[in-house]
Image (cartoon, grey):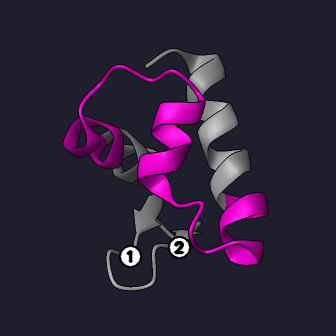
Amino acid sequence: MTLGQYRALVAYMNYWTPRYPNMGLNIAICDLGITDSRTDVILELWKAGHHFDEETGFLTYDDDE
């Protein structure tokens, strides 16, 4: 995943997903042309302090870490 794709993914998940829950992580990965596996994408988000909640499908950021 490129830095641009990462930034677009975070923006997508923070803007579209809360408004349209069906536009979640899997759709975002496809829409943005990310070729990394879903697991790798979640890991990269986690490394940067973002937490993907599987139950809600939302992305949160913990700035305390």
The residue at 34%/85% (across/down) is 55
Disc 2 is placed on an element classified as loop
The residue at 78%/60% (across/down) is 15
Majority secondary structure of magenta residues? helix
Q: Residues within 10 Å of mark 2 (few under 14, many from 20)?
A: some
Up-down relation of residue 59 to residue 43 (above or below): below
The residue at 69%/34% (across/down) is 8
Residue 19 got which mark? none
- Residue 58, position as x, y percentages in the image: 53, 73
Dots 1, 2 in contact, CB < 8 A: yes
In the orientation shown, which residue stands out farthest toward the front?
A: 22
Q: How far separated are the C-alphas under marks 1 and 2?
A: 6 Å
In the image, is 5 to the left or to the right of 51?
right
In the image, is 11 to the left or to the right of 1?
right
Q: Give the range drawn in magenta.
A: 14-43
Residue 58 got which mark? 2
Q: Which amino acid does label 2 sit on?
A: Phe
In the image, is 9 to the left or to the right of 36?
right
